Image (spheres, rainbow, N blue to C red):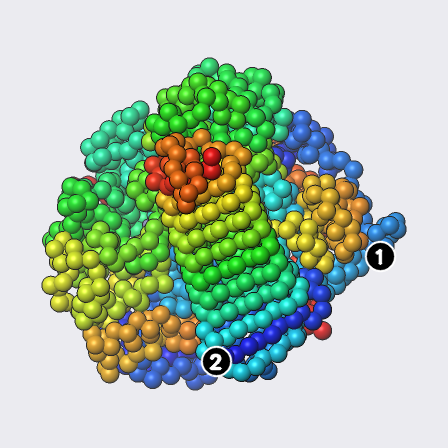
Amino acid sequence: MQTVAIKPKNGIKISAEAENISPDKFAGKSEKDIQSLEAWMGNQKTTLGELFTIKAEGTGAVADVKVVMEGDFSRVKRIGEGMTAGLVMIKGNVDMHLGAKMSGGKISVSGNVDSWAGREMKGGELIIEGNAGYYLGAGYRGETCGMRGGKITVLGSALDFLGEHMCGGEIIVKGNAGILAGLSNNGGKIVIEGSTSRPGSEMAKGTIIVGKVDEMMPVFKLEGTEAVDGVSYRKYTGDVIVNGKGVLYVKE
Amino acid sequence: MELLIKNGAVFDPANGIAGDKTDISIKDGKIVDKVSSGAIVIDAGGRLVMPGGVDAHSHIAGAKVNVGRIMRPEDTRAGIKPRTKITRPYTGYTVPNVYAMGYRYAQMGYTTVFEAAQAIMKARHTHEELEEIPIIDKGALTLFGSNWPTMDYVREKNMDKLAAYVAWGLLASRGFGIKVVNPGGGEMWGFGKNVTGLDDVVPNFEVTPRDIIVSLMKVNEMLGLPHSVHLHCNNLGKPGNYKTTLASMELAKQVKPSKDRQVLHVTHVTFNCWGGTNWGDFESKADEIANYLNNSENVTTDMGQLIFGSATTMTADGPVQYANAKLLHAKWANGDVELEDASGVVPIFYVKQVSIHAIMWAMGLELALLTKDPYKVLLTTDHPNGGPFVNYPEVIALLMSNKKRQEEIKTLHEAVHKRTKIPGIERELGFNDIAIMTRAGSAKVLGLLDTKGHLGVGADADVSIYDIKPDQTDPSAEHAKIKSAFQSAAYTIKGGNVVVKDGQITATPMGRTFWVDASVPDEQKEIMMKDIRMKFKNYYSINLANYMVQDAYLTHPYVVRAGVIPVEVS
Amino acid sequence: MSNVITDALCPFCGCMCDDITVVVENNKIIEAKHACKIGAAKIMGHHRIKAPMMRKDKNADFKEVSYDEAINEAARMLANSKRPLMYGWASVLCEVHKKGILLAEELGAIIDNTATVCHGPSTLAVHEKGLPTSTLGQIKNRADVVVFWGSNPVHAHPRHMGRYSVFAKGFFSEKGRRGRKIIVVDVRKTETAGMADEYIQVQQGSDYLVISALRAILAGQAAVVPDTVGGVPKEQLVKLVDTLKAARFGAIFFGMGLTQSMSRYKNIDNAISLTTELNSFGKHVIMPMRGHYNVTGFGQVCAWETGYATAVDFARGAPYYNPGETAANDVLTRKETDAAMIIAGDAGAHFPANSVRHLAKIPVVQIDPYWNPTTEVANVVIPVAICGVEVEGTAYRMDGVSLRYRKMIEPTHPTDLEILEKITKRVIEIRGE
Ligand code: SF4
Ligand SMILES: [Zn+2]
């Protein structure tokens, strides 16, 4: 078991890029080695140790690494990028690209996350107790697949383009989502317990379950009502434009 | 500056040198007889030495390449390298930025590359990019196959006017030669249609692809252009198109070459040697094309080898790209140019377990291995259509090692066994063959063998040294070593400057841009210009005075002169 | 001394009219024939910033300084910055863009252009769907159906209709306007709508829904489309689809009405798909109505130099691109930018108040021939020659055709190119010190 505790040193104004904050990068490294891992702030190359107070204890394989972060990380990007295992627990808010491309392990955040959390995620779990920004579980610009696997849970709300180009995996939002949730869904499952607008445009595959839709896309075929877990939903299929086999459930 | 390369195992096919230990002397950017004792000495230590690589068909600059970049940020992020003291940043894999384009070619030992298609109206853009590509010499072929003046003159059977138009078009675009893409199809694509064979009539212009190809071959030889007509055949991308390809090759018999080279270069054969009638019975007919090449003397080709993984298809063949986009459900860019031609860009991902892709992979290799004379098949991937040019070393290794091919075949869709001949082909090419397919042959096909593609006295001092000792290497067994050596040259020397050492860029001198200034008698030009002026007055959306590429866009030009000469037409 | 320049190019809007005849007397342009009113006004010029100016305190008045002083101070501000932004680039030539990108690399800056506030969203849509388009002459010679969607050429591109899209006659369109059906889709009845054959009024923010409905009808799925979509009756949508399907050559020109309304780039994304799908019936193309003459050119140059069309972040030495994160407004609203260079673009006038407030707090260098709202937030102002009038060079028309601007008169100020080169040189010196 290896525990790494991280706290921000000073207020960070210019976003830091800290893709090295990850169980994969920390596993088996000493406190000093972790502190000297590269980080960037604007155009200045620096180290994790310069930006954060870092305490490390014990040692272990990636899966046995636990990173505990406390404080304001709302200007720290790319935490947990590409991680394959282990645990990252964040008490506070974080900046963009949290857990991007992660394929395993678990990240939990007590506060809010900025855009592109879980971008191109392949596996593992992301739990966000606050709100998420734009493009939650989406892809990179121009790419045909966003999230491919794993699970994202948001206890608060998320902004626009949630799950864009999803090819797999699951996103659950307890609150509301912005416009065009599940755009071009190609096989993922999205649950929005609150409301959203224009969900499922261009969806070819996958499932979207929503509590309330402010504005429906005019591209879905109403198939009737269906009960999911004892709750009654209107069931739609589409997007008819792309001859889609996606299913959209809207609570009655 | 003087340079002496000693102890190299030199492969210089144009001069009949095949692995001999020969010294190469360089002075003022040229290969010379000998140098003074003050020359800087590079000891090749028995390693492989070849002329700098020459690529006669690659999409490196211009409107459609840039459209590829703009529509594919996901590709751009694939090849990122930060700037260094010497180099600007590298980006992209299938659509690299201008810097990566020059650096990566040089790192593979290539020193001369030709962009395969530019519309005259967009040539300024091509040259803006060529000017930014470091190190290599370059040039661009100009599209003529669907241009309205071309079709008018073909219909009128007025070869004098057509020759004058081609000469003027080359000047206007600072182009190097005549490119013909799906002749007639570009015009028809203007209304979303296409031609389906050599004898379809293009409406309103009343010409056929056959007429266009033959007429352009004739004027190509009338003008004595260094390169021949460079043809992307009709029906590309359709099963059964090998018949159109063979019929197009037949046309070459109607014209005699004005120089010691082919009269027709048929490009990226991987995309037009397709048998079958649909995707179900799709098969390779590369053997038929090879057979044709083995029995004819006036046609050359290039492979357009398919590379598994990401590619970006880009071509002036507009309709084929729309079909591709629909088939693949992929994003699609189209870029028709008024009065001239079309173009389209579509990303693709070639997969080993997709039967069509596996068969296409075999086609390029079959063509190269079944054609006896390597001068008739150049090594290309039709970058980035078949795959990015950085994969040339992979292709070289495949050609040199049956063992590697058999290993690869094991990982492919089984269709490769039934629908291609590749599993049973045992031929393994040698260093001399490779030197022809990537150097001497390309230079000969381009008509540049005087200064490019060889190491004789008077040639440009473009030399590559690879970390292989030919006499101690078995390419068949050690194919991985072959591949890695060709990926990263021990030395690349461009115009007498060491630009790469141990695979790293050491200097970034500016290369030259080759273009052809072909003269026609003034009266002939004047008569033709009357028509052109009319076209600008009525149809073009810009003024004639703003059309031609200005000198400012060629800061390092290299002009090849040509012009009207009598030609025998059989 | 009088001098006449023919075939000159107008450096105002994305039409890049290249048939202007300019009359010059004593190095002063006295007439710009053929140009429209807004073009002529640009060519004739107006009150210029005379000399470089500086001030420490943004509330204080400017003091005139020498070019060397201004360049030195600009270089110092930028070289000391950890998150520099270089923004603008709309009304300068491609040669300037190249120098700008080199400086951005040198500084580790973000470089972004004015597309971010107009047609930037179009680029994001191109990443998703590509762009089926053509040169403008293709439309002039062939188009029989032309749609202006959220664009108003009468107002913003006065000669567009005459030269390319509506009245222009060509090979297959010898009847000009009479042979063309003109359709305007907009939230309000614009001047262009007033002269169209058909006007379709879309509810504010509903373009995306309307385009999807059109695509569904085109796909033979009219049954699922509700009776009205975005305020447009279904019959009208069906009729529009029929018109488009019957077209031999259709062209859609979209403007900021589409790029800057709700769903933004997804509107364009959707319209591109509509265009693509229409190609199964006839020929169809789509084109953004780009505003400033060379806003397209920046995208082209930036793409071939960096691989990305705009909003490139060089902070880590290699280009990184992600609008929403790396565009000018993204870093300004987050108050990350600690120094900015605004060149040939007006951030002061076009950015949201939040961004402008941040600009007012950080060191700002402005490079521009003219005084504009950005000047109000600048510390260093460097006046330059006017590209396309006093400086020759390259620009890209809205359809991607590049043309070379002629020099009409001798400049009275140094060029952008010279200024950027000097700043770059000075930055390297400072960094080396
Ligand atoms: S339409 Fe545009 S380019 Fe043409 S003259 Fe007017 S402002 Fe200038
Ligand atoms: Zn090609």
Tell me the residue that label 1 is attached to: C56
Q: Are marks 2 and 1 on the same chain?
A: no
Residue type highlighted by circle 1: Lys
Amino acid found under the numbered disc labelled 2: Gly
Q: x, y (%) of residue C70?
A: 78, 57
Residue C119 left/right relative to B64: right
Between B510 and C158, the residue placed more toward the observer is C158
Chain of the residue under label 2: A
Q: Chain of mark 1?
A: C
Residue lying at the far front in this picture: please name it. Answer: A230
Q: Is the residue at mark 2 in contact range of ligand 2, meaning its CB lies under 8 Å from it?
A: no
Is disc 1 placed on a helix, strand or loop?
Answer: loop
- Please give the label number shown on residue B384: none
Question: Looking at the picture, does residue B375 appear above or below residue C246?
Answer: below
Vertical placement of C13 versus C315: above or below? Answer: above
Residue B120 figure quarter: top left
Task: Residue under label 2, please give it.
Answer: A60
Q: Residue at position x 54%, y 34% from top?
A: A214
Frontmost of labels 2 and 1 is 2
